[in-house]
Image (cartoon, grey):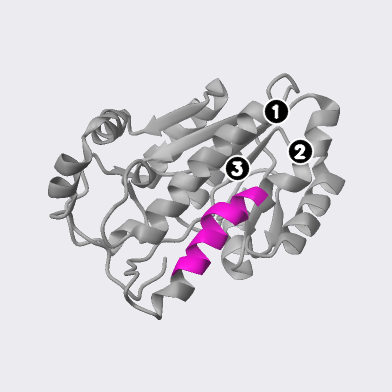
Amino acid sequence: MTGASSGIGAALAHAYAAKGASLGLLGRRGEALEALCASLPGEHLVLVADVTRPEELAAAARSFMARFGVPDVVIANAGVSAGTLSEEQGDLAVFDGILRTNLLGMVATFQPFIVPMRRERRGQLVGISSVAGVRGLPGAGAYSASKAAASRYLESLRVELRGTGVKVSEIRPGYIRTPMTDVNTYRMPFIIDADEAARRFIRAIERAPARATIPWQMAIVARLLAALPSFLYDRFAARAGRKPRGLKL
């Protein structure tokens, strides 16, 4: 599981460990991962890597499989968010970092496991997208674009792997109370705590759906947003709250 050191990742780690799972905890912050690992029951492996570096993910995958074998579930959870404006030259680098992490990092997370999973005709690849990818949000062009692209990527991968025994699921969260949302100054409807989100994520993953939106109320919101004609959506979205620029989480 990538992005394991905090937020949803850490909450998932606690929930899975309580169920007896052996985990590969991957992230950039080794000390935070070690502390998390020490707090969990069972046997787990700390994997310090950056999801924007495919060679580090490949090495981490080899280390995990050497110790535990081919995993039952791989969760591409790592993600970053920041307010962005296309008119700001300095935000080009922020766009690049968000897309590399949220989209290409997901691809690189899955890549080392697909051939072993296909060989054993089992396993599940789980990508964490976002309701923010349903329509473009003002001031969050990079984040919305990355999550929309992740959603389409997961759909493509699911079709590619149909009939191989390898399942692909998309978990599409709404607002979850984490450091990423703590900086938001606007109203966040139906927000839930990370621990509760983790329990719901795991229940959904066990069902192996093509897509699950959590909390369920946001699935209704997503369908309504997708159905709005552009002229109505534009009028509504122009008044939406915006994440602060210059803070990448």
Element on which disc 2 rests: helix
Q: Quadrant of the C terminus?
A: bottom left
Of residues 133 and 194, the one drawn nearer to the viewer in this rendering: 133
Spatial distance from mark 2 to mark 1, Cα to Cα?
9 Å
Note whether 25 is above or below 72 in the view shown.
below
Q: Position of residue 100 (x, y in %)?
A: 56, 61
What's the residue type where badge 3 is placed?
A: Ile
Query: Mark 3 or mark 1, which is nearer the start of the sequence?
Result: 3
Question: Which quadrant would residue 60 be assigned to in this image?
Answer: bottom right
| Residue that numbered label 3 is attached to | 75
Query: Is 218 displayed left or right of 94 in the figure?
Result: left
Q: Amino acid at mark 1?
A: Leu
Task: Residue 65: give x, y in percent of width and height.
Answer: 82, 45
Q: Are marks 2 and 1 in contact (CB under 8 Å)?
A: yes
The residue where tag 2 is placed is 114
Count of marks placed on residues: 3
Q: Which residues are magenta?
A: 95-107
Q: Is residue 75 visible?
A: yes
Q: Foreground: 77 or 53?
A: 53
Which residue is disc 1 drawn over?
161
Residue visible at 52% across and 26% down in the picture: 210
